[in-house]
């Protein structure tokens, strides 16, 4: 209950911040709507008594009061709806924006790679879309309902204090309704993984990207079967949860129905004995019907408020997960340096991904001198990308220290450091923007400069992509636009590489297999050209270039080569040194060279 009240309060505060005027107005209208109906009941009773007594004047006045109250209730409800509908949409927009911010504004990547975070995002996305302005309606209705229940209780107590048992009899449906909601919520949580899996398979089955592989591997049938299996598992879990919840709800409603019948019989008996008027019987029947409606609304509203509270609590959980953690003993983060003077060092670095217990890196001691080009090689899964992630500060080392010029990387302001990093990744994004924007987003301050974008494309050896586009830099990319250009995988990758080159003089340039879609010759030429530029920049700023590649024809150009095996640095040195050592590098190099002979 505390969570529900807390969630409702948070929603109230949120909407008050968005538009206090609209909130107060819709609240006033809602209170009018809710109090008008219970007040119409005594007016109806008076009307009945006046009619029975043949008092036409009193009957007309009571009839007018009944009509005014009923009309007020209907119109106030209608106008309240207009306001809270808009307010609810605005609140939804604000929460969705926060979800986007939470996903992107944290310095690390940990949350994106955590299964529990992915589950929460999945639930939040559907919940926000599903509830929409419904949360707002539930919030305002709950306040109006409070007033209506109070008025009804006073009127019932006036008739017979025993009738106060009616709202008490409303408690079982309320409590069982709550149990029902958490049962259904539990089922939703249990179904989230299968739901996510089914959606992922659906995207794979309907996206253009995987279509080729699906056909060549003949995966369509298997994919359909897996999708159907995941979907039916999710649906079965949800169905079981809903059935259990419905049984609980019906049980609660039956308790109230019994109380309703008893209350009516009580007043009818008094009337038969002459202690009550016909109007009183009408009053209790009307009020009891309203109590019934109030109970039903309370359960529905409470269910909605519980869902809202859950959404608010999930958002709070996410805020907590992505909250930057202060580094022990550091009052404020330090600014990143303008140049690297003594280099980047790893001392006793170990790393284990959160939520797992297998160390991915262990005992890594390294020294990357300023101004050098460093290549990282190693088998799939050896830990190359993880090294890169630590350097970009997507994660902090579990043990040991990564230092820039002797300063612990954790002590540097993460955004400031990243502003001095440029990176191209194997799993690059295909931003369906204008060509200039697709590249320019690599360094937002220069996104409007043709000169900067063209220079970046030049550095990435990617000018050729523009020649194939009808409107050059102004071409719309991507198939989601009717006039969007369809690019090949290699062309997308070249543009992504251009994006990585937008920062003209980064202190760290990371190229994590960003050229896998290019042929070996193109990659070789690109890096030759790039290494030359990197050395020139490196002389001025000490910039370090880090290249992850499986192609030894490219790797051999590096000043320093690191061979990663099983999360450790197995060998390091120049190409000539490593070949003459005759170790793992020499073996891998000779294997690849033999394939080209
Ligand atoms: N987010 C993650 N959570 C848990 N384990 C992970 C995560 N990312 C990577 N790993 C594991 O860490 C190990 C090293 O992965 P990494 O991506 O660093 O390898 P790599 O050398 O770059 O491989 P490749 O050449 O295939 O790109 C792998 O065993 C991988 O399964």
Image: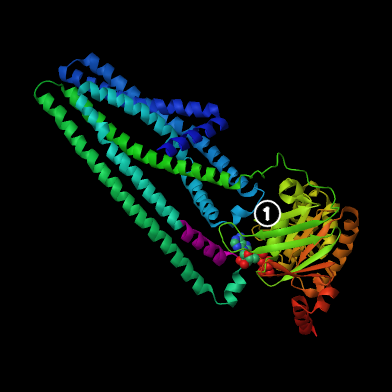
Q: Is residue 264 above or below residue 391?
A: above
Residue 106 visible? The answer is yes
Secondary structure at numbered mark 1 = loop
Tell me which secondary structure the magenta stretch mostly adopts. Answer: helix
The residue that appears at 32% across and 54% down in the rendered structure is 243
Question: Which residue is more in the foreground, 318 or 219?
Answer: 318
Q: Position of residue 486 (x, y in %)?
A: 70, 64
The residue that appears at 24% across and 28% down in the rendered structure is 164
Q: Position of residue 335 (x, y in %)?
A: 78, 44
Report whether 335 appears left or right of 101: right
Using the rendered view, name the quadrant where residue 329 is placed. Answer: top right
Q: Which residue is mark 1?
A: 394
**Cβ of mark 1 under 8 A from ligand 1:** no
Question: Which residue is more in the foreground, 69 or 446?
Answer: 446
206 drawn magenta: yes
For the N terminus, the quadrant is top left
Q: Which quadrant of the picture is home to ligand 1?
A: bottom right
Badge 1 local density, few (<14 within 10 Å), some, or many (20+)?
some
Report whether 391 appears left or right of 163: right
The residue that appears at 68% across and 54% down in the rendered structure is 394
Q: Is residue 488 above or below residue 84?
A: below
Magenta residue span = 192-207
């Amino acid at each position: 209950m505390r969570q529900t009240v807390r969630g409702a309060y948070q929603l109230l505060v949120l909407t008050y911040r968005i538009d206090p005027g609209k909130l107060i107005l819709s609240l006033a209208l809602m209170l009018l709507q809710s109090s008008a109906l219970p007040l119409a009941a005594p007016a109806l009773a008076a009307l009945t008594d006046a009619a029975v007594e043949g008092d036409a004047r009193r009957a007309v006045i009571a009839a007018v009061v009944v009509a005014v109250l009923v009309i007020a209730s209907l119109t106030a409800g209608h106008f309240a709806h207009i306001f809270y509908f808009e307010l609810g949409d605005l609140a939804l927009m604000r929460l969705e924006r926060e979800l986007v911010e939470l996903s992107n504004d944290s310095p690390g990547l940990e949350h994106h790679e955590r299964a529990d975070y992915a589950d929460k995002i999945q639930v939040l996305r559907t919940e926000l879309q599903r509830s929409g302005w419904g949360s707002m309606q539930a919030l305002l209705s709950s306040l109006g309902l409070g007033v209506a229940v109070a008025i009804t209780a006073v009127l019932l107590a006036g008739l017979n204090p025993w009738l106060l048992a009616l709202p008490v009899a409303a408690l079982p449906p309320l409590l069982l309704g709550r149990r029902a909601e958490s049962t259904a919520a539990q089922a939703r949580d249990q179904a989230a993984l299968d739901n996510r899996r089914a959606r992922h398979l659906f995207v794979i089955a309907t996206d253009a990207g995987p279509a080729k592989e699906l056909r060549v591997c003949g995966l369509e049938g298997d994919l359909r079967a897996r999708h159907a299996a995941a979907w039916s598992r999710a649906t079965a879990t949800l169905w079981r949860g809903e059935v259990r919840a419905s049984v609980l709800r019906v049980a609660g409603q039956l308790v109230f129905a019994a109380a309703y019948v008893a209350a009516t019989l009580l007043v009818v008996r008094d009337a038969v004995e002459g202690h009550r008027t016909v109007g009183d019987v009408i009053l209790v029947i009307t009020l009891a019907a309203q109590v019934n409606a109030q109970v039903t609304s309370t359960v529905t509203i409470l269910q909605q408020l519980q869902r809202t509270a859950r959404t608010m609590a999930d958002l709070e959980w996410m805020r907590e997960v992505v909250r930057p953690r202060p580094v022990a003993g550091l009052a404020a983060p330090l600014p990143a340096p303008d140049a690297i003077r003594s280099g980047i060092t790893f001392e006793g670095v170990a790393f284990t991904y959160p939520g797992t217990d297998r160390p991915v890196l262990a005992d890594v001691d390294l020294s990357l001198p300023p101004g050098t080009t460093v290549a990282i090689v190693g088998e799939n899964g050896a830990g190359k990308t993880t090294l890169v992630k630590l350097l970009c500060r997507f994660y902090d080392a579990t043990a040991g220290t990564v230092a820039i010029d002797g300063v612990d990387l954790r002590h540097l302001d993460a955004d400031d450091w990243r502003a001095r990093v440029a990176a191209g990744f194997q799993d690059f994004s295909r931003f369906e923007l204008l060509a200039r924007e697709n590249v320019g987003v690599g360094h937002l301050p220069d996104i409007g400069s043709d000169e900067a974008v063209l220079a970046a494309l030049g550095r990435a050896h990617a000018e050729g992509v523009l020649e194939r586009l009808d409107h050059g830099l102004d071409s719309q990319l991507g198939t989601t636009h009717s006039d969007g250009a369809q690019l090949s995988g290699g062309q997308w990758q070249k543009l992504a590489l251009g994006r990585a080159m937008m920062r003209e003089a980064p202190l760290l340039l990371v190229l994590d297999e960003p050229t896998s879609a290019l042929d070996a010759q193109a990659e070789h030429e690109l890096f030759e050209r790039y290494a030359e530029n990197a050395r020139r920049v490196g002389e001025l700023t000490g910039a370090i270039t880090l290249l992850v590649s499986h192609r030894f024809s490219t790797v051999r150009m590096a000043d320093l080569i690191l061979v990663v095996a099983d999360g450790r640095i197995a060998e390091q040195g120049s190409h000539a040194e490593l070949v003459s050592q005759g170790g793992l590098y020499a073996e891998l190099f000779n294997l690849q060279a033999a394939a080209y002979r």
